[in-house]
Image (cartoon, grey):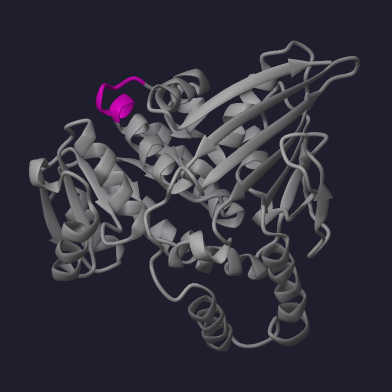
């Protein structure tokens, strides 16, 4: 049973520890839940800033619904960072509901987001609890840009792109994120077209040019992202098409080529053999936890182009240190939930639950992001 109001599940992972950094900064006590308590304590002492001033406990827990429910009970909010979520996420969602907790997570894996909505959205709403997937740099900043565009009357079509730059794409991505990326090969990807989810053409990439960058960026649908799911059923939005690109075109083309190789060689293998192939790819691509991000290297641009019949608008969010920003967004959401201030319960995005202007201001005040809007 948790002694503190917030649980960070996946506490020994990169994103979990950055979330704890921000909770400590806001003087919010937390329970760190992970499979190995000793390793978690060692990693936290190495990585978590200001740990000596934190109020926390560490709980060791197996990854199953009953054990997680017992570990979460007594808390009010669960921050879940255990991925790939398409494989491990729903147990945390179910356990948080059973324990009477709000649930936040950090993924935009579309197949998981759809499953969480269908299986647990109504139950969370009935319990007056928030289920907010994808409360993270990717894709909350793109959603903030989209919501800024939607402030212009008449906009009903959105095209978004999340573009990140680091030392190299593979050098700045965590093990969990890499596993989530390659899990996309097993899932369908959708965009929103005329109020319905439509499947993307398989393994299709897109060269996009934006004025903020000199060279074109090769982008992929990246599971389809969570945005078309969040905007499905929104009376303001008929169309939503979302892309992701790293300012490292060779790495992005490698991901696309591996998708084609997957279909040609692995798609029809048994599940266990597919798991082994994916594990080998992840291990060879991201062998270790990356270093803490630097604002001189890790910079991102999230763009939303909004169009209506006779109008258009472009909203851009510049940001730094995506994983650090994810920890900040998790904490911004936690603060609202602990105060009982959220727009609606059930399955919602971070912007729908807490307001895009609030989340943007939280990041702006901490030097993590700034936004601009232009009309044409």
Does residue 270 appear in this view? yes
Coordinates of residue 374 in the picture (x, y in percent): 74, 17
Q: Nearer the viewer, residue 265 or 256?
A: 256
Residue that sits furthest to the right in the current view: 310
* Image-based side of 21 in relation to 127, left or right: left
Residue 76 seen by the camera: no
Whether residue 260 is in magenta: the answer is no
Residue 365 in the image: above or below residue 76: above
* Residue in front for this viewpoint, 260 or 60: 260
Res. 144 image quadrant: top right
The answer to whether residue 38 is above or below residue 364 is below
In the rendered structure, does residue 337 fall within the stretch colored magenta?
yes
Nearer to me, 294 or 221: 294
The number of numbered badges drawn on the structure is 0
Query: Can you say which quadrant of the picture contains the C terminus?
Result: top right
**On the picture, is 283 further left or further right than 219?**
left
Taking the spot 55% from the left edge, 66% from the top edge, the residue there is 170
Q: Which residues are magenta?
A: 335-341
Residue 264, by quadrant, is bottom right
Image position of 190 (left or right of 339): right
Q: Nearer the viewer, residue 343 or 251?
A: 251
**Horizontal and vertical percent for residue 277?**
57, 85
Is 261 left, or right, of 327 in this rendering?
right
Q: Is residue 336 above or below residue 245?
A: above
Q: Where does the image place residue 209, in percent across and percent down from the top left?
A: 81, 42
Residue that extends furthest to the front in the rendered view of this protein: 296
Q: Residue at x 24, y 38 (%)?
A: 23
Q: Identify which residue is drawn at 66% across, 69% down.
A: 185
């Amino acid at each position: 049973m948790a002694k503190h109001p917030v649980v960070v599940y996946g506490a020994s992972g990169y994103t979990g520890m950055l979330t704890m950094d921000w909770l400590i900064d806001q003087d919010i006590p937390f329970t760190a839940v992970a499979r190995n308590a000793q390793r978690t304590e060692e990693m936290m002492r190495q990585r978590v800033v200001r740990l000596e001033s934190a109020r926390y406990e560490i709980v060791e827990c197996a990854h199953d619904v009953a054990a997680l429910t017992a570990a979460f009970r007594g808390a009010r909010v669960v921050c879940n960072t255990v991925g790939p979520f398409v494989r491990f996420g729903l147990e945390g969602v179910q356990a948080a509901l059973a324990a009477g907790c709000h649930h936040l997570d950090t993924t935009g894996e579309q197949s998981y987001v759809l499953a969480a909505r269908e299986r647990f959205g109504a139950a969370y709403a009935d319990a007056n609890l928030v289920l907010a997937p994808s409360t993270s740099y990717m894709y909350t900043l793109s959603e903030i840009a989209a919501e800024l565009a939607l402030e212009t009357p008449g906009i009903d079509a959105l095209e978004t792109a999340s573009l990140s730059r680091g030392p190299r794409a593979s050098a700045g991505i965590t093990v969990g994120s890499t596993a989530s990326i390659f899990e996309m090969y097993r899932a369908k990807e959708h965009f929103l077209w005329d109020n319905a989810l439509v499947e993307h053409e398989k393994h299709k990439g897109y060269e996009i040019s934006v004025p903020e960058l000199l060279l074109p960026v090769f982008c992929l649908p990246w599971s389809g992202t969570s945005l078309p799911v969040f905007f499905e059923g929104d009376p303001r939005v008929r169309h939503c098409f979302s892309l992701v690109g790293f300012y490292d075109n060779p790495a992005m083309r490698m991901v696309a080529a591996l998708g084609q190789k997957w279909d040609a060689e692995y798609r029809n293998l048994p599940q266990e053999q597919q798991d082994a192939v994916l594990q080998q790819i992840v291990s060879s691509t991201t062998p270790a936890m990356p270093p803490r991000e630097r604002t001189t290297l890790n910079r991102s641009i999230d763009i939303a182009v909004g169009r209506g019949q006779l109008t258009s608008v472009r909203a851009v969010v510049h940001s730094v240190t995506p994983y650090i920003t994810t920890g900040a967004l998790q904490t911004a959401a936690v603060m609202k939930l602990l105060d009982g201030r959220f727009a609606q319960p059930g399955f919602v995005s971070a912007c729908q639950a807490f307001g895009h202007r609030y989340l943007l201001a939280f990041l702006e005040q901490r030097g993590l992001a700034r936004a601009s809007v232009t009309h044409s």
